[in-house]
Amino acid sequence: MTNSEILEKIKGGLIVSCQALASEPLYDSYIMAKMAWAAYLGGAVGIRCNTVVDIKAIKEKVDLPVIAIIKQDYDDSEVYITPTMKEVDALAEIGCEIIALDATDRPRPNGVTFEEFFTEVRKKYPNQLFMADTSCFEEGKKAEELGFDLIGTTMAGYTPYTKGTSLPDFNLMERYVNELSTPVIAEGGIWSPDELKKAMDIGVHAAVVGTAITRPMDITKRFVKAICE
């Protein structure tokens, strides 16, 4: 698919995040591929996924565009979503349709700024679709100026300066849709079909739902909390 065809394929649809960290019960590429297949059968238009091994397993199982990331911790930075060129290179090598990376106003590893990092990334991969995982309007505006293809609300509430933000961050979605020209991906804290519908009604290009669909431990905790309070 061309980049235009990829963006058109996900337009107006649900992207399901199929991820599990090493500390979680479902940490297994086979399981993530099955999760993605279930999402595909349920009508998802795309999959957000983490790590090269999971992405390869998922792409073998379902023919949907992926929003690919690599979560990697570095001692000198709080940024962990595709934080360096090493992770970008690994994702580009396996042919990911969309690569997402942290676009917050925080230094990358080795003290590299967000602007410096993405300028280098875009120069190296001029034809790759990139999604900016942002936490506030200023970051989204900067991402648009730098040439990102998609802007997501992924990090709202997860940076020190947005801590306590009510999720989903519908206000941020509205500002992006109304004040920017780059397609918007609603992501973060969408727990119900009603919240998903509200995000779509705002005019976002597509929406990502993860925990509410693919993390049974967290879903169970939510139900248990309801009867224990």
Image: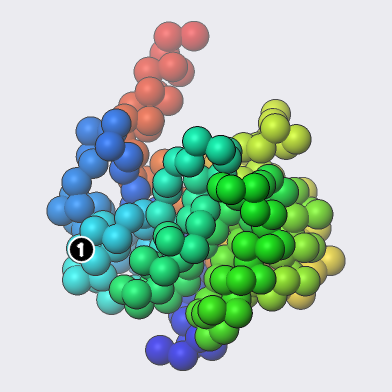
Work out whether 42 lies above or below 125.
Answer: above
State the residue lying farthest toward the top: 229
Can residue 64 be seen in the rendering of this structure? yes
Residue at coordinates 38% horizontally, 30% vertically from top-left? Answer: 218
Kind of residue indicated by mark 1: Ala
- Residue 50 is left or right of residue 84, and the answer is left
Which quadrant: the N terminus?
bottom left
Toward the viewer: 207 or 43? Answer: 207
Can residue 202 be seen in the rendering of this structure? no
- Residue 192 is left or right of residue 46, and the answer is right
Query: Percent position (x, y) of residue 18?
Result: 34, 52
Work out whether 125 lies above or below 211.
Answer: below
Is label 1 in a helix, a strand or a loop? helix
Tell me which corner region of the image, top left, top right, bottom left or bottom right, holds residue 42: bottom left
State the residue lying farthest toward the right: 179
> Total number of numbered labels?
1
Tell me which corner region of the image, top left, top right, bottom left or bottom right, holds residue 20: top left
Which residue has dot 1 on it? 57
State the residue lying farthest toward the front: 110
Residue at coordinates 43% horizontally, 61% vertically from top-left? Answer: 86
- Residue 29 is left or right of residue 91, and the answer is left
Query: Percent position (x, y) of residue 168?
Result: 63, 43
Query: Percent position (x, y) of residue 163?
Result: 69, 31
- Residue 118 is left or right of residue 49, and the answer is right
Work out whether 51 lies above or below 168.
Answer: below
Query: Percent position (x, y) of residue 222?
Result: 42, 25
